[in-house]
Amino acid sequence: QVQLVESGGGLVQPGGSLRLSCAASGSIVSIGVMAWYRQAPGKQRELVARISSFSSTNYADSVKGRFTISRDNAKNTIYLQMNSLKPEDTAVYYCNAQVQVIGQYALGNYWGQGTQVTVSS
């Protein structure tokens, strides 16, 4: 019903930048909160940043001042601009969205397949 497709991951040196994108498609009526999570090897998945449909944002303390989440409602797309990357930012980054689909009233919770971000010299 809903597909979330991430792109933009890759290998970058410490101090570098990357921009992730996540596009939602399918039988969408409306989208609520969208977010980026990440999961490093051996660790639990954690919230990185989230953005409401009105572009209100929240960030994990570990990324404040370095990462910026933004949203294009016309394209059902969110972005994560990541600057001053550190080795500890290495993880698989997942897109998450709360989506109302055709024929349903409640918002469903959807995940993308993930994109690898590796910060290493």
Image (tube, rainbow, N blue to C red):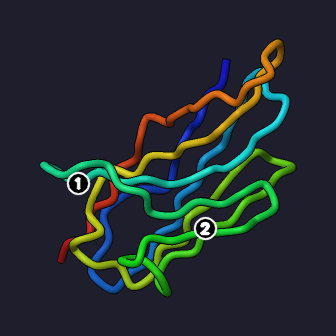
Q: Nearer the viewer, residue 89 or 29?
A: 29
Answer with the quarter of the image where residue 120 lies.
Answer: bottom left
Q: Which residue is mark 1?
A: 40
Q: Residue at x 63, y 50 (%)?
A: 34
Answer with the quarter of the image where residue 114 lies.
Answer: top left
Amino acid marked by disc 2? Ile
State the SS at label 2.
Answer: strand
Amino acid marked by disc 1? Ala
Q: Which residue is mark 2?
A: 69
Q: Nearer the viewer, residue 78 or 9?
A: 78
- Residue farthest toward the left in the current orientation of the protein: 42
Q: Residue at x 70, y 50 (%)?
A: 77
Which percent across, then down, holds residue 112? 50, 36
Q: Residue at x 50, y 35 (%)?
A: 111
Judged left or right of residue 50, residue 87 is left
Quadrant location of the C terminus? bottom left
- Residue farthest toward the top in the current orientation of the protein: 103
Which mark is first along the chain, 1 or 2? 1
Q: How many marks are shown on the rendered structure?
A: 2
Q: Residues within 10 Å of mark 2 (few under 14, many from 20)?
A: many
Which percent across, then down, holds residue 51? 66, 60
Q: Residues within 10 Å of mark 1 (few under 14, many from 20)?
A: some
Quadrant location of the N terminus? top right
Up/down of 25 relative to 95, above or below: above
Question: Do the numbered discs 2 and 1 sit on residues whose CB atoms are within 8 Å?
Answer: no
Q: Nearer the viewer, residue 15 or 60?
A: 60
Which percent across, then down, holds residue 59? 51, 71
- Residue farthest toward the front in the current orientation of the protein: 106
Judged left or right of residue 18, residue 79 is right
